[in-house]
């Protein structure tokens, strides 16, 4: 029985561990764990089952160069810009990117294909006005933030991107009239409209009609007329034109040919 247990132990040892050297303390065999997350060709530190000796961890990190520090600084600056200038209805939006966008059905694939086309044009330096319309829950917010994040990353974090939940911004403007910190945050967002490489304008048309809201929309499109914007909306193009007028609609529609999509026949994406 003891011999069978010994064989079982050896079989388990060989299944999950591999020999990687000789123990400097007792001369026994060192064994290295075969983990799923282990980098290819790099053994984890060895250990001796006889005396308990463990090898120290070996660093596989290469010394950082000045270009590494520059890239890290650029990434930090780009991410800080995105977080500081954006306005979210909830923090969950920040975690929505192309990597976790569900792509199974034909409408989902069409939406993803459109997104990839927009990103490629942005990386080529083209001005893009993309309009993504459709019912609530079909993935408009998810894919639009995914476009922004992918553009930021693929540009080497040189692109300045921001996400603006339109209704949330207008509501914050009202709440911030008597709150200096909120007012300053909102003004930083509005000032960035003129300089950002890409603005995602999410949920346009969901706000109530008022002169103030219409003036804000006009202000946005005046400064973004020849700068890239991804707009999402639950209302139709005809309703956008009727609500904001011909001038705003003309600015939105410029650079939009081939970059827009009306999402239909798609299940609710908000749980993904």
Image (cartoon, rainbow, N blue to C red):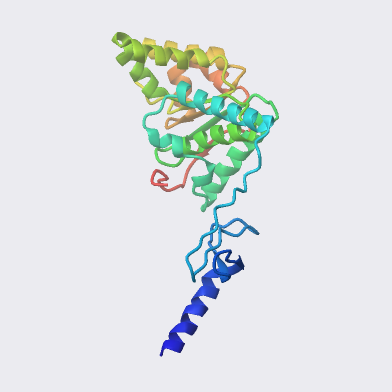
Q: Quadrant of residue 67?
A: top right
Describe residue 141's horizontal placement relative to residue 250 as left or right: left
Q: Whole-percent x and y of residue 155?
A: 64, 31
Q: Whole-percent x and y of residue 15?
A: 53, 74
Please say if 97 is above or below 59: above
Q: Looking at this view, is 52 or 73 the one in front?
A: 52
Q: Whole-percent x and y of residue 115?
A: 58, 38
Q: Looking at this view, is 209 or 191 the one in front?
A: 191
Describe residue 91's horizontal placement relative to residue 71 as left or right: left
Residue drawn at x 65%, y 36% as measured from the top left = 64
Residue drawn at x 58%, y 30% as measured from the top left = 75
Q: Looking at this view, is 35 or 79 the one in front?
A: 35
Residue 183 visible in this rendered orientation of the protein: yes
Q: Give the position of the N terminus as an image quadrant.
A: bottom left
Q: Looking at this view, is 146 or 228 the one in front?
A: 146
Residue situated furthest front in the rendering: 25
Please say if 75 is above or below 266: above
Q: Whole-percent x and y of residue 2?
A: 42, 87
């Amino acid at each position: 029985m003891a011999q069978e247990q010994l064989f079982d132990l050896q079989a388990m040892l060989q299944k999950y561990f591999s020999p990687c050297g000789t123990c400097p303390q007792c001369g026994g065999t060192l064994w290295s764990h075969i983990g799923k997350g282990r980098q290819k060709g790099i053994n984890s530190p060895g250990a001796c089952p006889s005396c308990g000796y463990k090898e120290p961890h070996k660093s596989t990190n290469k010394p950082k160069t000045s270009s590494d520090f520059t890239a890290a600084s650029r990434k930090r600056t780009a991410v800080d810009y995105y977080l500081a200038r954006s306005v979210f209805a909830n923090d969950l939006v920040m975690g929505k990117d192309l990597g976790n966008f569900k792509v199974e059905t034909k409408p989902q694939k069409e939406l993803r294909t459109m997104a990839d086309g927009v990103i490629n044009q942005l990386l080529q330096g083209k001005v893009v006005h993309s309009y993504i319309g459709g019912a609530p829950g079909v993935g408009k917010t998810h894919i639009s933030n995914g476009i922004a994040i992918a553009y930021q990353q693929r540009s080497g974090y040189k692109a300045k991107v921001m996400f603006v939940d339109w209704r949330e911004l207008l509501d914050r403007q009202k709440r911030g009239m008597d709150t200096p910190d909120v007012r300053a945050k909102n003004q930083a967002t509005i000032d960035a409209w003129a300089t950002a490489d890409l603005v995602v304008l999410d949920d346009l048309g969901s706000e109530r009609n008022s002169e103030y809201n219409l003036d804000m929309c006009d202000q946005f499109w005046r400064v973004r007329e020849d700068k890239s914007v991804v707009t999402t909306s639950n209302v139709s193009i005809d309703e956008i034109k009727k609500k904001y007028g011909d001038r705003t609609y003309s600015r939105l529609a410029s650079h939009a040919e081939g970059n827009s999509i009306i999402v239909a026949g798609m299940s609710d994406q908000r749980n993904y």
